[in-house]
Amino acid sequence: MGTSHLLENFDPMEIIVNSTGALVYVIDLHTYEILYVNNQCIEEFGNVVGKTCFKVLQKNQEIPCTFCPIHQSADPTVHPVGATFEWENHNTLNNRHYLFNDRIIRWKNGTLAKVQVGIDITEQKKLELEVLNERDESIRSFEALSNSTIEGLIIYDDYKKCVRVNTVAPKLLGYDIGEMIGKNALDFVAPQSHDLVKRVIHNENQEPYEAYMLRKDGSTFPAILRGRDCVLGGKNIRVSAVMDISDIKEKEKKIVKLAYYDALTELPNRALLQEYLHRMIKQNDRHNYYGGIFFIDLDHFKAINDTKGHQAGDLVLIETAKRICSVTRQSDAISRMGGDEFVVLVNTYKTDRDTAIDHISVIAEKILAELQKPYLIMEHDFRLSASIGIALFMNDEHSVDDLMKYADSAMYNAKANGRNTFKFFDPELQKIIENKA
């Protein structure tokens, strides 16, 4: 049975229409005249039958309501009978929210009209607004928290495409926020770390690990990465945290430098030298190569400190380190043991003993000659020489400490034999050198 027929026979239906608690209007689509209202409508807006709908049902409205879907058409009468529309509206007269359902009908005398049924949803809208406010507050709180962290947070979708970032991530990587959206996760990873990240990124809840990240300008930096897979709004996402550890790495380097390098000359110290010597012994043992330990001590260096001061003495030691480095190979290890004592580790890469001795002797002569050159320090012309003790080795027959002791003993032998010379620890080798001289 059609709505128009029910309303025309309103005796029993009037009771039903008025008992629903909904607003019910009938509005002429040609003239916008209100043709019928139920009691609920009269209670809200008064008896508005015969009046123009948009003028009496809205505040200060002088033209048809643009928010009404039927009247958004240039000609509302083009809609066919039976067409329905659903829409929401905030009424400006009573400040209430309504959900409307409109249906096109034929009214009395064939007039094209709409039946408009409105349900008050004000309380639901308040609840919805509260939920939205809570959600927005949660989002704001999350963003405030995520933006206050030192980590860059990057959210990826199921295809590992960036969909969201906090404010820290673009600063770390040198992008604007918009430039990061849509980029692949590996676009932010340095090439040398691609394989590592590809393996780890498949872990649902990965442990922190180190990798190198790639900035927009092509520069890289070390970082600690963490990642976790989550479901948000029914979608799989991955939250990745990036922390720049460049400062930490620099501090580590400084700590290592303090632990393994001489502060004055920046040469390896005794601890690092011993590691080098252990490695060389193992290598030479495998290949039957001969190596040599040079123990170098400057002659009469104490007089410089006593007469010219420690600043002059320090500059002499720095210059000595440079000179020793200038006449040795990159593969040789040079160390300052303390005071005016230096040690050089030389791998001859020779399996013949005599050839190895000749090779080491040439290097010792170069060092002595270089250290005899004038030292022009703080307007002073210092003339120095050195005594060098050498211990020859090929395998692990002798311990590192023993080899150092042998070289030191040979150095004292060189001092006892007039200084400005070198001596081998092995008495037989020393005889060979003296016979060749």
Image (cartoon, grey):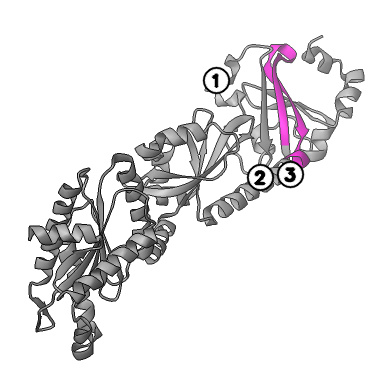
**Mark 2 and mark 3: Cα distance apart in space:** 14 Å
Bounds of the magenta segment? 98-125
* SS assignment at label 3: helix
Disc 2 residue crowd, few under 14, some 14–19, many 20+, Cα 10 Å: few
Q: Is residue 134 magenta?
A: no
Q: Which label lies toward us, 3 or 1?
A: 3
Question: Residue at horizontal 20%, vertical 86%?
Answer: 303
Q: Magenta residues: mostly which secondary structure?
A: strand
Question: Residue at horizontal 18%, vertical 88%?
Answer: 308
Q: Does the magenta stretch include residue 104?
A: yes
As displayed, is residue 91 above or below residue 102? below
Question: Residue at horizontal 52%, vertical 22%?
Answer: 74
Mark number, residue 135? 2
Residue 159 located left or right of residue 433: right
Closest to the observer, 68 or 295? 295
Q: Which residue lies furthest to the top in this view?
A: 1
